Image (cartoon, grey):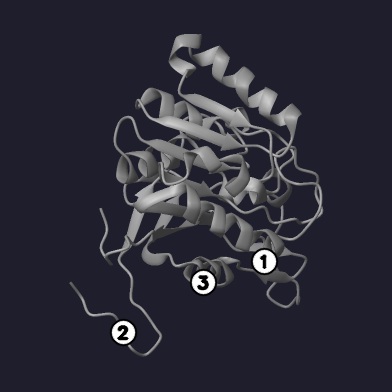
Amino acid sequence: MTKPSTSGRQLLPLSVWLCADEQPERDQATTGCPRRNTLVGIELARHLITACTKPGELIVETHPINAATLACAALQARKAIALVPKVAHAQAIRAQLQKIFPAKELTGVRLRPCSPQQMDAALAKQAGAARLVIYAPPCHSGRQCPACPESGDSANERPAVMRGAWQVLGDGGHLAVVTAPHREGEQLYDQAPALIRAARAVGFAYTQHVIALRVPVREGELVVQAAPEGLGHLYDVRRPAPPVTVGVHADVLLFTKVASDGGTR
């Protein structure tokens, strides 16, 4: 085992996952959410579930945009609980699942219409039972989102979500935080450093950084398409405004709950 660095800095294993979904994003996600760059689609959910869990184990997801994680859990014989802040959105996700699976295949899948900040209370009976928690923080950009809280700041919810994840996970369990820099006007915001600090403050060990590519790879090249509003834009290097950017990946920060004896399962 590599000896931890005493300088305060840490070099982490880096992985790249190909997570381009064949199904169009508009068919997987509820429209109107600005968190497109942190969308947990079918392929990313499959990677996380197969890498971090075994059949029969419990997965918890906070404010999902779509039914991707729950669908993958049902397909791979895992149990799953999704914390959805809005009842209407929970009903929409349930309807999506019912179109795909018969009722008997959804017995291990549940939706809780509560805030992720209430995870410790809502999942008190599942304390120590989960193997994976998936947390995709909302960006609170001011645009309406059917999956996210109507107001607030991600910074305010981080400590509660981290504590809830620590409580619901068993020793050796994993917290996967899905994030990506997002632009508000000309300012670029990256939540990753603050999320890493919040997770470590609770006791999590930061074990891996994954780059989840959301666009297909053809003959070694990324197949990228700009949003419709950016297709006709020609960037003038003489202008101070930033160029049109296209999100092609998400950052997946993987943390581990270290066992009381200092090891992992």
Residue pictured at 61% horizontal, 21% vertical: 94
The amino acid pointed to by label 2 is Ser
**Residue 32 visible in the displayed image:** yes
Mark whose residue sits in front, 1 or 2: 2
Q: Please state which of residues 221 and 260 is positioned toward the viewer in this rendering.
A: 260
**SS at circle 1:** loop
- Mark found first going from the N terminus, 1 or 2: 2
Q: Secondary structure at mark 2?
A: loop
Amino acid marked by disc 3: Ala
The nearer-to-camera label among 3 and 1 is: 3
Q: Position of residue 155 (x, y in %)?
A: 68, 65
Q: Secondary structure at mark 3?
A: helix
- Going by the numbered disc 1, the residue's amino acid type is Pro
For disc 2, the marked residue is: 5
Residue appearing at x 37%, y 39% in the figure: 49
- Are the residues at dot 1 and dot 2 in contact (C-beta closer than 8 Å)? no
How crowded pointer 2 is (Cα within 10 Å; few <14, some 14-19, many 20+) is rated as few
Residue pointed to by mark 3: 201
Q: Residue at x 44, y 15 (%)?
A: 105
Quarter of the image with the N terminus in it:
bottom left
Q: Are marks 3 and 2 in contact (CB under 8 Å)?
A: no
Image x and y of residue 119, in percent:
60, 46
Query: What residue is shown with label 1?
Result: 243
Q: Is residue 232 left or right of residue 81?
A: right
Proximity of marks 3 and 1: CB atoms separated by less than 8 Å? no
- Residue sitting at the far bottom: 7
Dot in front, 3 or 2:
3
